[in-house]
Image: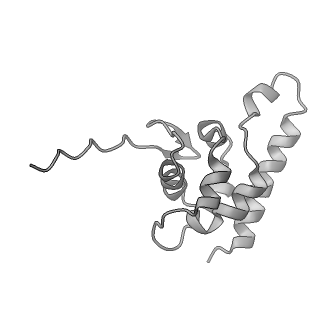
């Protein structure tokens, strides 16, 4: 069973990787995904755990995601990170918070499916 500590470690690894790679000339522009990864982990971890059902994120979680480039972050999801979080829930949380995650975006091995068509108006 995954704990918040495991998720925090996985996100710390992601953040560290980004910070290290930003020092390599020519790569930094590709890795500027915006956002505060520590705050994202702190505020959103409970909503992206593999265990349990999807639950709407808190307003604090949404606040941390408002300026994050999710497709950019998705490019840096490694298998160890993907094994700790539900990418489907992560996309659900982002979309629920109003953050655009285009269909076809690849997050680790997860590919964001097309959004369902809007329901027809009730007559």
Q: In the image shown, does 97 or 13 lie closer to the viewer?
A: 97
Q: How many marks?
A: 0
**Rendered residue at 60%/54% (across/down):** 62
**Rendered residue at 88%/41% (across/down):** 20
- List the single residue furthest toward the right: 23
- List the single residue furthest toward the top: 26
Q: Position of residue 21 (x, y in %)?
A: 84, 36
Q: Position of residue 93 (x, y in %)?
A: 52, 55
Q: In the image shown, does 111 or 95 lie closer to the viewer?
A: 95
Q: Position of residue 45 (x, y in %)?
A: 65, 65
Q: Tell me, what colour scheme is on the image?
A: one colour
Q: Is residue 17 left or right of residue 66?
A: right
Question: Vertically, is 2 above or below 100?
Answer: below
Q: Is residue 42 left or right of residue 109?
A: right
Q: Is residue 41 left or right of residue 21?
A: left
**Rendered residue at 40%/43% (across/down):** 113
- List the single residue furthest toward the left: 123
**Rendered residue at 17%/46% (across/down):** 121
Q: In the image shown, does 7 or 65 lie closer to the viewer?
A: 65
Q: In the image shown, does 56 or 6 lie closer to the viewer?
A: 56
Question: Vertically, is 45 above or below 110?
Answer: below
- List the single residue furthest toward the front: 123
Place residue 90 in its image quadrant.
bottom right
Quadrant showing the N terminus? bottom right
Q: Position of residue 120 (x, y in %)?
A: 17, 44
Q: Is residue 80 left or right of residue 89?
A: right
Place residue 4 in its image quadrant.
bottom right
């Amino acid at each position: 069973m995954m704990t918040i500590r495991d998720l925090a470690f996985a996100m710390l690894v992601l953040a560290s990787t980004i910070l290290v790679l930003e020092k390599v000339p020519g790569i930094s522009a590709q890795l500027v995904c915006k956002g505060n990864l520590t705050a994202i982990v702190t505020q959103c971890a409970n909503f992206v755990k593999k265990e349990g059902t999807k639950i709407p994120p808190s307003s604090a979680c949404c606040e941390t995601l408002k300026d994050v480039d999710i497709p950019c972050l998705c490019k840096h999801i490694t298998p160890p990170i993907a094994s700790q979080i539900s990418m489907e829930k992560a996309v659900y949380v982002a979309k629920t918070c109003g953050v655009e995650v285009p269909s076809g975006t690849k997050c680790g091995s997860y590919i964001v499916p097309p959004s369902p068509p809007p329901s027809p108006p009730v007559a």
